[in-house]
Image: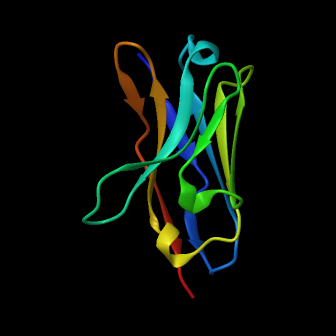
Amino acid sequence: QVQLVESGGGLVQPGGSLRLSCEASASFFSIITVGWYRQAPGKERELVAAVTSTGNINYVDSVKGRFTISRDNAKKTVILQMNSLKPEDTSVYYCNLKTTFRDYWGQGTQVTVSS
């Protein structure tokens, strides 16, 4: 059974930084795409950033230049470094593992950007 354990959310002032971490128990971690999504109240869940097994990275336009995604296959971990945070980044952030057959999701971690 695949488990995803997220950490690193919290409250930060505009312009601040947070680092989200997701550790997976999946044996197939190194061969799949992993990423982060977010969902704000009343809005649809959206992809924030993803990195493929070959290292190709995709960001939503609104976070380009501010967020950095990385993966450590040995530790089965995906990191989202978030800098220059804005109030509109406030959301619940979810770790995602994407396989051919299904997606796996973390429990979500709250990120609140407010002064």
Image point (35%, 13%), residue name: 101
Instruction: Name the residue furthest front.
Output: 61
Q: Which quadrant of the rendered structure holds the N terminus?
A: top left
Residue 67 found in image quarter: bottom right
Vertical side of 83 occupied by 16: above or below:
below
Q: How many marks?
A: 0
Give the residue at x 53% y 51%: 60
View extreme (left): residue: 42
Q: x and y percent of residue 91 in the render?
A: 43, 63
9 and 49: which one is in front?
49
Q: Position of residue 82 (x, y in %)?
A: 67, 59
**Which residue occupies 61% across, 25% down?**
52
Closest to the observer: 80 or 23? Answer: 80
Residue 42 spot, x, y in % from top left: 24, 65
Q: Is residue 16 left or right of residue 92?
A: right
Q: Position of residue 43 (x, y in %)?
A: 29, 61
Q: Residue 35 occupies which quadrant of the picture?
A: top right
Q: Is residue 32 above or below residue 49?
A: above
Q: Say whether residue 48 is left or right of residue 100.
A: right
- Is 65 drawn above or below residue 58 in the view shown? below
In this rendering, position of residue 24 left or right of residue 82: left
